[in-house]
Amino acid sequence: MTKVNVYVTLRESVVDPQGTAAKEALLNLGYNEVQNVRIGKLIELELDGAVTDIETRVKEMCEKLLINEVIEDYRYEIGEAAGK
């Protein structure tokens, strides 16, 4: 089994209302050094198969279902295979 972490973020050109709200809250709490906040998501996958095939399959999963290519970017890290 191979673990894959997919990191999804909004594209720079997309307004991040959740990030803006978090930034304002942090500033109100006195964290004046905060200049910007962008909030994304982490998707953890556990997959069976050869690592070379997994990379292709992860790209397909992201582009077909896990991300919205119009407003989101993604990157992924393939972890080491772990046996049960």
Image (spheres, rainbow, N blue to C red):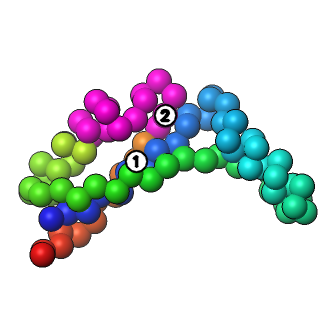
Residue type (three-letter) at the residue carrying disc 2:
Glu
Q: Which region shows up in magenta?
A: 59-73
Q: Is residue 80 magenta?
A: no
Q: Secondary structure at mark 1?
A: strand
Indicate left or right for 55 with 72 as reference. left
Indicate left or right for 50 with 21 as reference. left
Residue 5's place in the image compared with 82, above or below, is above
31 or 78, which lies in front?
A: 31
Indicate left or right for 70 with 38 as reference. left
Check residue 83 in the rendering and tell me which mark sits there, or answer none: none
**Where the N terminus falls, by quadrant?**
bottom left
Please count the marks in the image. 2
Q: CA distance from mark 1 to mark 2?
A: 10 Å
Check residue 75 in the rendering and tell me which mark sits there, or answer none: 1
Residue 41's place in the image compared with 46, above or below, is above
| Residue 36 can be seen, yes or no | no
67 or 77, which lies in front?
A: 67
Residue 57 placement (x, y as % from top left): 19, 43
Residue 10's place in the image compared with 79, above or below, is above
> Disc 2 designates what residue?
72
Front label number (1 vs 2): 2
